[in-house]
Image: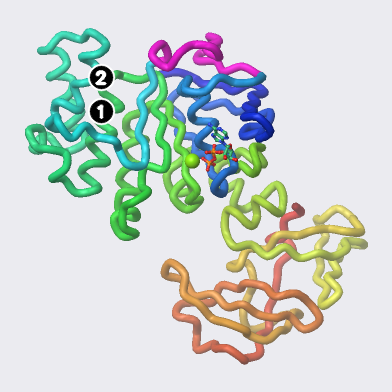
Amino acid sequence: MSEVALDHVTKRFDSTTAVDDVSLTIADGEVLGVVGPSGCGKTTTLRLVAGFETATDGAIRYDGDDVTHAPPENRNVGLVFQSYALFDNMSVLGNVTFGPKMHGVGKTERRERAFELLELLDIAELADRDPRTLSGGQQQRVGLARALAIEPRILLLDEPMTGLDAKLKQSLRTELGELLDDLGVTTLYVTHDQEQAMAMCDRIAVMNDGVVEQVGSPADVYESPANEFVANFVGTSNVLSGSVRGGRVDFGFAAIEAPDLPAREDANLAVRPADFTVGSGPISGEVRNVFYLGGTVQAVAALDGGPEVTVALDGDGSGISKGDRLDLGLDASDLHLV
Ligand code: ADP
Ligand code: MG
């Protein structure tokens, strides 16, 4: 296990800057998620850490040792990719003992190590199976056992849940999150799925167009997005513009008391759907749509004289439907300057 640091790392491919001056530290034993839309540079970041790509600029350090130009085989990283890429012509045990064998670990020791991991992952009874006969979830665990068998300094996971069905994804998310916690291995977890990252990681870095927009705990990033991109990416968030002066924020369509916000003419304020109080308040609008999202109900409302906002409704939606009038309250403490 190691602390891993990226220090002003840039990676260019011809005219594309895939990773643009990224600085990140993954603490020893920490699970850091890297999230962002497709093409933002997540996989390139992971490949730079693994040594499959070499930085155009900047440095990568493991426990302070500069590994920027070290080949992957000298970095001792454990990798899990989306398709698991298990070896079909080998049993589960063969897959898990393969890495240690390549590292010159003796037969008895590598079998012992493999069984320890298979026990830990609760798949010891699958040791002799052909990976092709396993379920997606079982294959994922074999992939993880194989990556951990080399006792990596860092575990790198790139979209490990892609290709699994939604239900399995949800249960594995909890399981894998707990497992990574228990293992205490320094982990870089790359995914376009911010919900997954939020649920599983100690901290998350939100990437956009090669740049890290924000790094923080899931709660920090969710509750205090650094900018509009983060606000939109990490969850539906409404960004309202207004002016703050004399302890009030004036949105144009409504004004509320905001004693703690600094005065500012053009403020962009992020508001989470759940932060609106539904039923009373100074903001009014008309419901344009009601939809169901992961066990919660949300409404899109067109505010009178203002933009459309997304509002979380209580319970099953409390009988609110398209075309209804809606009164909304908002507490200034739930507004975040972006
Ligand atoms: P993500 O994993 O977030 O989807 P990638 O890191 O794969 O993003 O890609 C980031 C950008 O770098 C994209 O524009 C992609 O086309 C480009 N890119 C990645 N690898 C290469 C490569 N080997 N050659 C040229 N361009 C690349
Ligand atoms: Mg990728």
> 217 or 67: which is nearer to us?
67
Q: Residue at x 72, y 50 (%)?
A: 227
Q: Position of residue 189 (x, y in %)?
A: 45, 37
In the rendered structure, does residue 219 fall within the stretch colored magenta? no
Give me the residue at 27% from left, 41% from top: 140
Picture mark count = 2
In-image side of 81 versus 308 (left or right) = left
Q: Is residue 199 above or below residue 255?
A: above
**Image quarter for residue 168?**
bottom left
Quadrant containing the N terminus is: top left
Residue that mark 1 sits on: 146
| Residue at the image position 33 percent from the left and 53 percent from the top | 169
* Of the pair 3 and 207, the residue shown nearer to us: 207
Q: Are marks 2 and 1 in contact (CB under 8 Å)?
A: yes
Please name the amino acid that badge 2 sits on.
Gly
What crowding class fits label 2: few (fewer than 14 Cα within 10 Å), some (14-19), or many (20 or more)?
A: some
Would residue 171 appear left or right of 126 to someone viewing this image?
right
Label 1 crowd (10 A; few <14 / some 14-19 / many >=20): many
Indicate the position of residue 275 as horizontal and vertical percent values: 63, 67
- Residue 162 position in % (x across, y down): 37, 49
Amino acid type, residue under disc 1 in the picture: Arg
Which stretch appears magenta?
58-75
Answer with the quarter of the image where residue 90 lies: top left
Work out whether residue 216 or residue 213 is closer to the camera in this orientation and state it.
Answer: 213
What SS does tag 1 mark? helix
Earlier residue among tags 2 and 1: 2
Residue 99: which numbered mark, if any? 2
